[in-house]
Image (cartoon, rainbow, N blue to C red):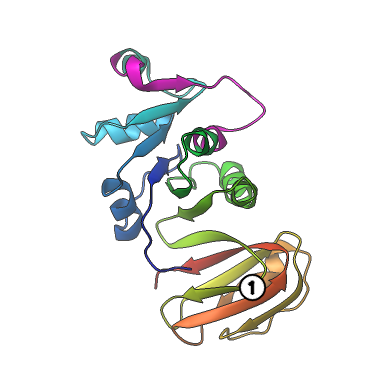
């Protein structure tokens, strides 16, 4: 599940702009870039032009609201965040394979919210992953296989899964309820498998 795949679009959220190779490659090589409000300011400051800017407009600069008015998709709904608005927009356009960058940093509560929302996006039909400067978050259901580097740090955040077991991790899994209980594991080889019934989110470091 961690092998490169053809991505239809990248969402740049309004967290910290990516600085390391993998998330930057995802962003700069994407066929379509959807920026969330203030994320567009950072992207444009790099001399780049988004394909669409999505959000309620509260964090986009006044200058860019005028300059890029023709590509702004205003979504005033305050019951959800701009990252979710971007995912919903892409799904309506038939875009299902989505990478997210810039979803963490600046505010820890936003980071946790953006990560936990990945499970909801999977339920909505998106094949989605969120790339930080250090690793990737992947929403999963039931049995899944992963490729990585031996020694990569791995954490599993349980949503509602039962009968959790793993092959290829340093420490065994069990049916845990608290998010911290599945953290700080390690890949014993270049791949591992998780067996479960239900939903969970896997985090894997690049190194």
Q: Tell me: 106 left or right of 18.
A: right
Answer few, some or many: residues within 10 Å of disc 1's Cα (few below 14, many 20 plus, some between 14 and 19): some
Residue found at x 63% / y 31%: 80
Q: Quadrant of the C terminus?
A: bottom left
x%, y% of residue 82? 53, 32
Q: Is residue 82 magenta?
A: yes
Q: Secondary structure at mark 1?
A: loop
Q: Residue furthest front?
A: 94
Q: Quadrant of residue 21?
A: bottom left
**Residue toward you, 133 or 2:** 2
Q: Which residue is mark 1?
A: 143
**Residue toward you, 78 or 2:** 2
x%, y% of residue 124? 62, 45
Residue found at x 39% / y 45%: 10
Residue found at x 41% / y 40%: 12
Number of disc labels = 1
Q: Quadrant of residue 69?
A: top left
Q: Tell me: 33 left or right of 180.
A: left
The magenta segment is: 67-86
């Amino acid at each position: 599940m961690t092998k490169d795949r053809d991505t239809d679009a990248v969402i740049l959220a309004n967290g910290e702009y990516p600085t390391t190779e993998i998330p930057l490659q995802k962003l700069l090589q994407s066929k379509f870039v959807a920026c969330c409000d203030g994320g567009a300011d950072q992207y444009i400051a790099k001399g780049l032009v988004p394909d669409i800017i999505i959000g309620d407009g509260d964090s986009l600069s006044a200058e860019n609201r005028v300059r890029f008015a023709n590509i702004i998709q205003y979504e005033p709904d305050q019951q959800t965040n701009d990252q979710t608005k971007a995912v919903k927009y892409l799904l309506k356009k038939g875009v299902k394979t989505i990478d997210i960058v810039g979803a963490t940093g600046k505010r820890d509560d936003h980071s946790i919210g953006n990560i936990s929302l990945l499970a909801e996006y999977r339920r909505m039909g998106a094949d989605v992953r969120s790339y930080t400067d250090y690793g990737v978050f992947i929403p999963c259901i039931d049995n899944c296989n992963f490729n990585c580097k031996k020694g990569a740090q791995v954490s599993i955040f349980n949503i509602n899964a039962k009968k959790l077991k793993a092959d290829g991790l340093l420490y065994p899994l069990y049916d845990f309820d608290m998010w911290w209980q599945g953290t700080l594991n390690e890949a014993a080889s270049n791949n591992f498998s998780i067996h479960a019934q239900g939903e969970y989110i896997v985090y894997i470091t690049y190194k």
